[in-house]
Image (cartoon, rainbow, N blue to C red):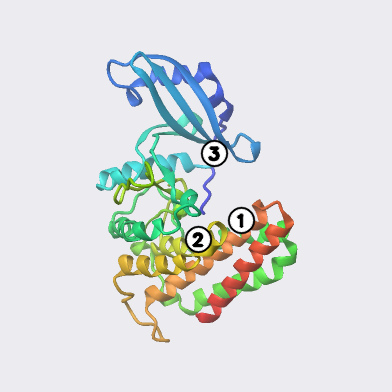
């Protein structure tokens, strides 16, 4: 993920101040209400407060009007530009005819670095993994085709940061720090894998994309950021899905989304539905078939295509990123050791296959 700092002070606690927010919604009512609606009151729900520090928060506002209640979602960040990126990315999707697949943005309020959006109904596929492990297979072709449409748009949004080689190095320094600090017993193996992967990048450097070929990349494309609807066991809503959480979008190699999705699908099935782990392989094959058709493109020195090399590279990169995140977030020592061992072993096996 690319982190871009904002250079101004943000008082995020104002987002929880009823009087302040009521005044804000009244001043910008045209963004949230119809012409005849009048705002009477609001209810504020703090949905997420990362690590309890009031820096990165998700909120839900119930706007009580003379016509009833309207629900508005919001994200605010004290130090990073993620709300700004998310707002502009959703506007960009709408302009390119893909708005039906994403949440609807309502407003971006610069003084609080706050992004408002319409609540997207549904439940994440991640939450359904243990309940309906085969449900994901049904949706895989549509999701792969959506991602391909996104990556086929040649326009490069100027509001997004570019993930070049220097940005990659910066990201990896952060992973090194997290593992060294939070899981030092795994640091030698983690470091060895990451260095080997970087050598692969240098070996096949001529097969990687240059800036002119970069596209919009979601940056965290996985089942947890895709919503669907299920009314009951007998009711199916064919191919309904919404992709959310574009706050870490950037311009880069589109196969970073594909490799990341495949790596996280395997990891999620191991965690949520281990009895159905073979479904991850079925999803992998269907996703690749519907995204690529076939893995064509320029052939490498070892007879593999540029797409194949890059796909493996970004999949391994995501596995190592997940290992760093597990080191940082997992508090249970036994679970941390088990998770990191599995991820680092997986990364090592895939590096050898390259």
The residue identified by callout 1 is 325
Number of the front mark, 3 or 2: 2
Give the percent coordinates (x, y) of residue 58.
Answer: 52, 36
Residue projecting furthest to the front: 234
Image quarter of residue 294: bottom left
Q: Residue at x 39, y 56 (%)?
A: 135
Does label 2 or label 1 sit earlier along the sequence? 2
| Residue located 62% across and 68% down the image | 342
* Residue 141 image-quadrant placement: bottom left
171 above or below 116?
below
- The label on residue 339 is none
Q: At 34% from the left edge and 50% from the top edge, which residue is drawn?
A: 157
Disc 3 to disc 1, C-alpha distance = 26 Å
Q: For the residues marked 3 and 2, what is the alpha-carbon distance in whole angstroms?
A: 33 Å
SS assignment at label 3: loop
Tell me, yes or no, whether the two marked residues, 3 and 2, touch with CB atoms within 8 Å.
no
Q: Residue at x 48, y 43 (%)?
A: 82
Q: Which residue is mark 2?
A: 264
Circle 3 residue: 7
Looking at marks 3 and 2 on the same chain, the residue that comes earlier in the sequence is marked by 3
Badge 2, how many Cα within 10 Å: few under 14, some, many 20+?
many
Near mark 1 (Cα within 10 A), the count class, few <14, some 14-19 or many ≥20, is some
The answer to whether one can see residue 174 in this image is no
Mark 3 or mark 1: name the one nearer the start of the chain. Answer: 3
Query: Element type at marker 2?
Result: helix
Q: Quadrant of residue 194?
A: bottom right
Describe the element under mark 1 as helix, strand or loop.
helix
Residue 23, position as x, y percentages in the image? 45, 16
Q: Nearer the viewer, mark 2 or mark 1?
A: 2
């Amino acid at each position: 993920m690319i982190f871009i700092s904002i250079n101004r002070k943000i008082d995020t606690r104002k987002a929880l101040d009823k009087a302040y927010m009521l005044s804000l919604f009244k001043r910008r009512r045209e963004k949230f209400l119809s012409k005849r609606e009048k705002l009477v009151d609001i209810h504020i729900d703090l949905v997420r407060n990362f690590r309890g520090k009031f820096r990165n928060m998700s909120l839900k506002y119930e706007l009580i009007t003379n016509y009833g209640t309207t629900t508005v979602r919001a994200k605010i960040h004290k130090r990073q530009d993620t709300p700004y990126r998310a707002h502009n990315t959703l506007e960009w999707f709408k302009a390119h005819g893909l708005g039906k697949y994403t949440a609807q943005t309502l407003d971006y309020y610069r003084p609080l670095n706050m992004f408002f959006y319409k609540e997207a109904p549904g439940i994440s596929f991640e939450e359904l993994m243990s309940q309906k492990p085969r449900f994901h297979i049904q949706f895989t072709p549509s999701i792969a085709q959506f991602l391909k449409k996104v990556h086929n748009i040649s326009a490069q949004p100027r509001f997004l940061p570019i993930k070049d080689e220097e940005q990659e190095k910066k990201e990896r320094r952060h992973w090194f720090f997290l593992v060294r600090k939070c899981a030092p017993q795994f640091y030698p193996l983690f470091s060895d894998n990451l260095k080997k992967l970087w050598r692969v990048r240098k070996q096949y450097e001529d097969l990687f994309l240059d800036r002119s070929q970069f596209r919009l990349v979601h940056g965290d494309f996985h089942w947890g950021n895709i919503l669907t609807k299920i009314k009951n066991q007998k009711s199916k809503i064919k191919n309904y899905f919404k992709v959310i959480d574009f706050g870490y979008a950037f311009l880069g190699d589109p196969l970073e989304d594909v490799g990341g999705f495949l790596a996280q699908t395997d990891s999620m099935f191991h965690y949520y539905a281990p009895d159905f782990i073979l479904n991850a392989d079925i999803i992998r094959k269907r996703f690749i078939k519907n995204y690529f058709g076939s893995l064509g493109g320029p052939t490498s020195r070892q007879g593999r295509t540029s797409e194949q090399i890059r796909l493996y590279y970004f999949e391994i990169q995501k596995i190592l990123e997940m290992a760093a995140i597990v080191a940082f977030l997992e508090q249970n020592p036994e679970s941390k050791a088990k998770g990191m061992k599995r991820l680092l072993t997986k990364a090592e096996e895939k590096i050898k296959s390259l």
